[in-house]
Image (cartoon, rainbow, N blue to C red):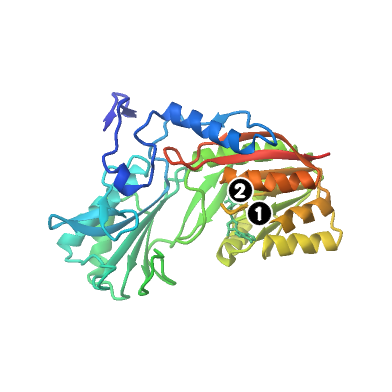
Amino acid sequence: MAERSNKGNLKYKKDLKCSVAKKCGGCDYINSPYDKHVKEKLEKANSLIKKYGKFDGIVSMDNPYHYRNKVSAVFGFENKKIIAGTYEKNSHRVVDTKNCLIEDEKAGSIIQTIKKMCVSFKIKAYDEDTGFGFLRHVLIRVGKKSGQIMVVLVTSNVIFPNKNAFIKVLRGEHPEITTIVQNINNKNTSMVLGDREIVMYGKGYITDELCGLTFKISPKSFYQVNRDQTEKLYSQAIEYAGLQGDEVLLDAYSGIGTIGLIASRCVKEVISVELNKDAYKDAITNAKINNIKNVKFYNADATHFINDLAAANEKIDVVILDPPRTGSTEEFIAAVGRLKPKKVVYVSCNPETLARDLEVFKKQRYRFEKGMVFDCFCHTGHAEGVCLLTRN
Ligand code: SAH
């Protein structure tokens, strides 16, 4: 249980336990001591890459709680009472995650209010099995630095009964909410968000600040869930790149453009490639918001794109890649080998595919120089790693 210290900060008892951890499956290690778990994470990552090198350490969090800036909840019933939470692993049973220790606290409190409002407004929670009911999910995104909060109400139907009164009551209880969006998902799918969106209040998006730049976050945008740790991770990636100001940098798997835009201040030019169209569009918007002009964005498969760069004999000095959990491809790495950048900085959210890709980089004469692990997903089995590879 969390306690408030007299300074108003949250203080946690040593024997902190989450009673629903097993059912929820969100953070498998919440009930073991944080320092021990962090040490094990580093050891595990190091054992995976031991053939190629060693991470210098792991950057943990001083307060590894309530870091998640993206929180979603489904609604269900327990003893005839409405509950909000997440689906139990491999089932449609809802687990009540009322006092979740990794999710943003304000988001948690907004979800509790919406839960109560479902009763007073006679809103029926959607039932995945029968297809009846109105409210499917609530998704909340918090700009941890900006303080802006977006509430996305995912509904099965476009007609929102008592809409204006609903907005008024919700905002009355939570004036910190800066925008409310209705998302309509009438498909039989496990995807949270549907295609259609109606802005109910505010701008329909929030912004947040990362490494001194402003980023636009729409309901569907990809944005790292742990902002503070991401800032440290990106700073490390850019430091490893050792930029002098005259380089051409390739930012591959660039998402909404974060790493490339942050690095753009230290180089001549950035070329950024991303497969997801929405993320690519957000990246262009993010360049405009920050008045950055030396980044070119491409909406393409990173492997196809880098093959084209290599075929055209383009000059690339540094490559930063941040692929999804599945890692990069042999073909991508072979093209890096042909482009011969001096440095490659690999940002990885999966040490297993990193190890596999390091083997391919080795064949292309890129050696693991140094690396660092970042605990971005505290209390879960996941870890982010960043490493510098240099050409022999
Ligand atoms: N660097 C960004 C995004 C990292 S997540 C950030 O930190 O915010 C990985 C990104 O790779 C996602 O945005 C995903 O859409 C993108 N992606 C996945 N497969 C891809 C491919 N084959 N080519 C290019 N981008 C891809």
Q: Are marks 1 and 2 in contact (CB under 8 Å)?
A: yes
Looking at the image, residue 91 lies above or below residue 372: below
Q: Residues within 10 Å of mark 1 (few under 14, many from 20)?
A: many
Residue 149 shows up from this direction: no
Q: Earlier in the sequence, mark 1 or mark 2?
A: 1
Which element is circle 2 on?
Answer: helix
Find out if the beta carbon at label 2 lies less than 8 Å from the nearest ligand 1 atom. no
Amino acid type, mark 2: Thr
Numbered badge on residue 328: 1
Q: Provide the residue designation for mark 2.
A: 353
Q: Is 58 rendered above or below residue 281?
A: above
Residue shown at the point (30%, 65%) measured from the top left: 136
User: Looking at numbered disc 1 in the image, what kind of residue is underneath it?
Assistant: Ser
Judge by depth and name the residue closer to the eye, 315 or 47. Answer: 47
Q: Is residue 198 left or right of residue 112?
A: right
Identify whether 182 is placed above or below 26.
below
